Image (spheres, grey):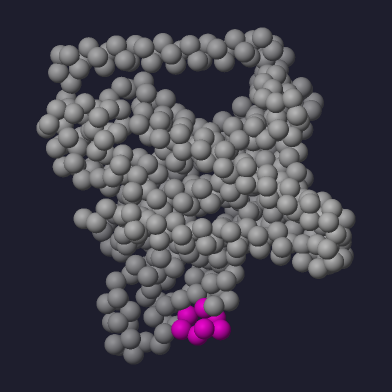
Amino acid sequence: MDVFSDPTNIDVYVTGFLWILKLTAAGAVGALVIGVVLAAMRVSPVPVLRGFGTLWVNTFRNTPLTLIVFFCYFGLFSTLGLSLADDIDLNNYWLGVIGLAVYTAAFVCEAIRSGINTVPAGQAEAARAIGMSFFQTLTMVILPQAGRAVVAPLGSIFIALAKNATIVGTIGLAESSNAMKELINANGDAVIPIFLVFAGTFAIVLIPTGYAFGWLANRLAVKR
Amino acid sequence: MSADAVLYDHPGPKAKIRNAVLTAVFGVAALGLVYWIYRKFDEKGQWAAALWRPFTESSTWTDYILPGLWATLSAAAVAMVLSLIFGIVFSVGRLSDHWWLSVPSGVIVEFFRAVPLLLLMFFIFYGVPFITEAPMDPFWAVVIGLTLYNGSVLAEAFRAGIKSVPRGQSEAGYAIGMRKSQVMREILVPQAARAMLPVIVSQLVVLVKDTALGYIIGYSELLQDGVNTLAANFGNIVAAAIVAAIIYITVNASLTTFAGWLERRTRRQGKAPKVSGGPAPVAAVPAGGAGGA
């Protein structure tokens, strides 16, 4: 483990995982906001909104994230001139966040929509019977119950998001997978320890997170 | 709730007008968005015929896009076969009564499910050659990475599938004197495999999408050939990326449709065991969602 006694290498490792953390945090917030709005659109009475939601989901769910992130950089930034920050790393970071958010939002939308389907029809019927509008029914009756049913799927989506954050390395951000590549190329004699440290960090954080979401889902589940 | 339409009443005269107004407002907004994108593209000269003309010539397709698509599909197909084998071996291993089989299988499956695929591919492509002292073929780096990751995901899906077969099935097997391995091989796995068929096909979508990671380690698949190399020749990266996206979407949407058809077909005959346990069964979590890249 000589590799990790060198402070510069430790620095590469820490910086890599800090980027992953920041990408996951901002991506999760963006995906959740867009995803809930998309889910609301997909169950709304207005056909144009339903069509927009469906189009979004089918487009981004079926496109590789690598291509989306690639397009964010070469399309939005290089060609169309969308610059989000003066600092090159920060610019790449925000472009990556856009890619992660629009991609993950499609999955969040589908998870919430299937959560809406777990709410018994009687709930919505009762809400309508006392004169609630569509928006009231959705936000006060359906979504609170659906939200509790989708904790587990959302958990796996966010875990996937944390892993997918490594793909932003494609556009040059020194996140953990690029950091690992750099260390491997510089220390060919310690390839396996390097991999185990990087992969182990993900495993140690993500496996318990998965179980925590499972526990939370059980606790929050609406007992019917 | 079976139909989403339960969320709102059948529109009366007032609601009809309101919906018409909302349709008009959002329709205009959507058209405005399309027009804004059109203008943005126009400003940067992205509608220039020279950028799109290459896609009308057959040489563009035969030189760049089709070889790339072939490389994408072949890597996905090989990885699919290998991950099915991996998945069956490790799901059965994890369900074994012997701790020396079930514990290592569980550790391997949980580990590869938690590690980002790109990290795995980087290790196989850049790290393994240091150990074996032989260069790694990018094709195999992609296929091995995909197999380890998707195989582990499938192993968990199979395990859920095998557990969902009613207990009476294995009890009946034991009652007529079958051994544990016979019950697994001849009774549980065949029934679980049928119930799992839609999940397997959806996982194929994840595989097709994840081959795009091969671009990062220099495997000449659709993103590398059809977008990167093509755009280097014609200077039309936005156009090329859009065409490639349409190809990916077409392939994956047909796979999704196929999975949906399979699911309806299995359900209609009503013989397959139900794959569900609680509010969020493994199979109901969009498999593509959980792992997709």
Residue for point 76% across, 30% down: A88
Residue for point 43% across, 13% down: B29
Q: Quadrant of residue A198?
A: bottom right
Residue B69 in the image: state x and y as whole percent: 65, 40
In the depicted view, which residue is nearer to us: A104 or A144?
A144
Residue for point 39% across, 50% down: A151
User: Looking at the picture, does residue B253 appear above or below residue A79?
Assistant: below
- In the rendered structure, which segment of residues is drawn in magenta? B96-102
For the C terminus of chain A, the quadrant is bottom left
> In the displayed structure, does residue B218 sit left or right of residue A41?
right
> In the displayed structure, does residue A94 sit left or right of residue A185?
left
> In the displayed structure, does residue B148 sit left or right of residue A217?
right
Residue for point 37% across, 56% down: A217
Residue A128 in the image: state x and y as whole percent: 16, 31
Residue B282 in the image: state x and y as whole percent: 41, 58
> In the displayed structure, does residue B276 sit left or right of residue B156?
left
